Image (spheres, grey):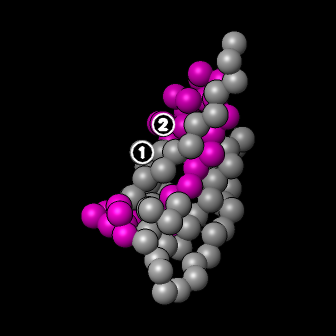
Amino acid sequence: MMFKKVLLVNDDGIYHSAFKATVEAFKRLGCEITICAPLNAQSAKSHAIEIRNTFEVKKVDIFEGVEAYAIDSTPADC
C-alpha cells in the first residue's frame, strides 16, 4: 500500500466542524493528516496575504494523531 499524506486547509478556521468528518474519513483510509488553517474564519479572503506584519503559527491539539497548526492570518499564508 502506498503511504498517503494529506494536507487539509480551509478558510473557515482551524476549529470549523467540517474538519472532524474529513479527518475521520482520511484516517479510515490510513492517511497521515496535517491541518493548517487560519485561527479564525477568513471567508472571502482566500487569496489575501499578509505583507506588512508578522503572524503567529501555533501548533494545536484538536484531533488525536493529527498534526495541526493554527495561523493567525489568512488562508493563503497557510
Q: Position of residue 26 (x, y in %)?
A: 56, 29
Q: Is residue 40 visible?
A: no
Q: Helix, strand or loop at disc 1?
A: helix
Outermost residue on the bottom side: it is 52
Q: Helix, strand or loop at disc 2?
A: helix
Q: Position of residue 45 (x, y in %)?
A: 32, 67
29 above or below 66? above
Q: Which residue is labeled 1 in the image?
A: 18
Magenta stretch in the rendered image: 20-48
Q: Position of residue 7 (x, y in %)?
A: 56, 43
36 above or below 3? below
Q: Is residue 37 visible?
A: yes
Label 2 crowd bin: few (<14), some (14–19), many (20+), radius 10 Å? few
**Residue contact at pointers 2 and 1, CB within 8 angstroms:** yes
- In the rendered structure, which amino acid carries the disc numbered 2? Thr
The answer to which image quadrant residue 76 occupies is bottom left
Q: Position of residue 3 (x, y in %)?
A: 70, 24
* Residue depicted at 57% across the width and 78% down the height: 55
Outermost residue on the top side: it is 1
Q: Which residue is labeled 2 in the image?
A: 22
Residue 73 lies in the magenta stretch: no
* Residue depicted at 53% across the width and 60% down the height: 78
Depth check, front residue: 39 or 46: 46
